Image: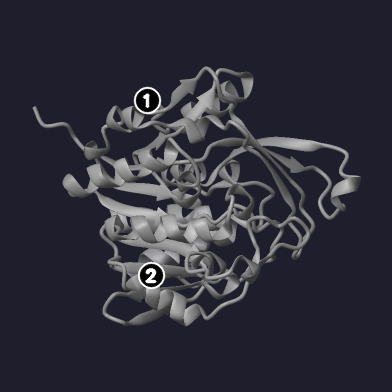
């Protein structure tokens, strides 16, 4: 009997996120933290689930209380956790984050011996990727073995089974021994990818020639300053075989680049920003929802922009992803698609 396909499986990081309770306070003056969950693929899976998508998450946690915390949240959200393994000799990862709007969001990753980096080829083979419509993979999972090989394996399985592969570039500079290694891995996997999603900085990072092009201020690991020619970088990535490249531009929305050399800009929704962290993951969830409904790229990106706009007004990531009713009401209130 043929198995009914699930909508999407996301693969990569998962963590406990400790967000400053003292909005606007310098990091050294933080008095307490709220415990949420995070990690780009986890956030995207939750964003999809809250919109009504049948979402699975392929990751790993340690045999620890943080792992239990992550799994408990995902199960309550309705994300399929059957693909998540518990690694006995690794730890669930953690992130500590400050919130100093409008433009300072320092963060510290605790990912030494991270369980989600220990996802293996066997874990991928057991995840039934072929029973999903979309596989979303993540750039950070390419930084170390065995998750690097597991990511390539996942993409290969998807390609063989007509599962669309989406890559979230997810450049986290301090997770790479050499910034240029990020680009080497991304460019190696792009021929297996249909749609890639990234900020201008992440796209520049994927085409770096010199590590000196990258600078990080105020420990904003997720938002480095990167020098380069964005148009050349976009063209270089499109030449590697992807059909679509989505360039996230913050409050300016997103630009859709196709391999036929066309560009379409999709406006965002203006809001007052509290915290930018997680906005890109919310965008991905909203965008993928639209794609799964059969919407065109423009409408799907508007849905993604709406999700991102709602999350930047909140203090966390996965815990604050909007529901379908919330997003539709938000879009209607802002003038529609």
User: Residue at the spot x=50%, y=46% of the render?
Assistant: 143
**Element class at badge 2:** helix
Residue at the right extreme of this rendering: 29
Q: Mark 1 packing: few (<14 Cα in 10 Å), some, or many (20+)?
A: few
**Element class at badge 1:** loop
Image location (x, y in percent) of residue 112 = 63, 34
Image location (x, y in percent) of residue 168 = 44, 55
Task: Using residue 275 as the reference point, say whether residue 141 is left or right of it.
Answer: left
Image location (x, y in percent) of residue 183 = 47, 61
Foreground pick, 191 / 74: 191
- Total label count? 2
Q: Nearer the viewer, mark 1 or mark 2?
A: 2
Residue 296 shows in the view: no
Task: Using residue 166 as the reference point, say whether residue 21 is left or right of it.
Answer: right
User: Residue at the spot x=54%, y=56% of the render?
Assistant: 171
**Alpha-carbon distance for marks 1 and 2?**
34 Å
Which image quarter holds the C terminus? bottom left
User: Residue at the spot x=66%, y=52% of the render?
Assistant: 314
Return the residue at label 2.
237
Residue 5 shows in the view: yes
Foreground pick, 116 / 287: 116
User: Residue at the spot x=42%, y=55% of the render?
Assistant: 185
Image vertical order of residue 209 relative to residue 21, above or below: below
Return the residue at label 1.
82
Image vertical order of residue 34 relative to residue 86, above or below: below
Foreground pick, 286 / 247: 247
Which image quarter holds the N terminus? top left
Image location (x, y in percent) of residue 225 = 66, 69
Q: Which mark is residue 111?
A: none
Q: How is the image coloured?
A: one colour
Task: Using residue 317 as the reference point, say whether residue 267 is left or right of it.
Answer: left
């Amino acid at each position: 009997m043929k198995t009914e396909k699930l909508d999407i499986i996301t693969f990569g990081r998962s963590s406990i996120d400790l967000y400053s309770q003292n909005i606007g306070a310098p990091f050294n003056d933080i008095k307490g933290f709220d415990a949420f969950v995070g990690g780009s693929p986890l956030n995207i899976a939750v964003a999809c689930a809250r919109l009504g998508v049948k979402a699975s998450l392929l990751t790993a946690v340690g045999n620890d209380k943080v792992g239990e915390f992550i799994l408990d949240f995902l199960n309550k959200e309705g994300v399929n956790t059957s693909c998540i393994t518990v690694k006995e000799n690794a730890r669930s990862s953690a992130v500590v984050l400050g919130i100093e709007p409008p433009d300072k969001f320092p963060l510290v990753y605790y990912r030494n011996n991270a369980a989600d980096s220990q996802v293996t080829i066997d874990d991928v083979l057991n995840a039934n990727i072929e029973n999903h419509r979309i596989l979303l993979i993540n750039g950070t999972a390419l930084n170390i073995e065995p998750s690097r090989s597991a990511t390539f394996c996942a993409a290969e399985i998807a390609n063989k089974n007509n599962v669309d592969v989406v890559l979230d570039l997810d450049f986290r500079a301090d997770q790479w021994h050499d910034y240029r290694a990020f680009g080497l891995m991304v460019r190696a996997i792009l021929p297996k990818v249909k749609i890639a999603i990234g900020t201008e900085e992440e796209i520049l990072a994927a085409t770096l020639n010199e590590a000196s092009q990258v600078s990080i201020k105020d420990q904003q690991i997720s938002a480095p300053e990167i020098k380069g020619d964005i148009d050349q970088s976009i063209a270089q990535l499109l030449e590697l075989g992807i059909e679509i490249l989505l360039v996230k531009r913050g409050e300016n929305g997103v630009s859709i680049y196709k391999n036929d050399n066309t560009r379409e800009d999709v406006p965002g929704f203006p809001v007052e920003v509290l915290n930018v962290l997680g906005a890109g993951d919310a965008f991905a969830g909203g965008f993928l929802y639209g794609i799964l409904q059969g919407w065109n790229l423009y409408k799907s990106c508007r849905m993604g922009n709406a999700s991102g706009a709602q999350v930047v007004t909140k203090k966390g990531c996965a815990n604050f992803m909007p529901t379908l009713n919330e997003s539709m009401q938000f879009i209607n209130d802002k003038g529609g698609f």
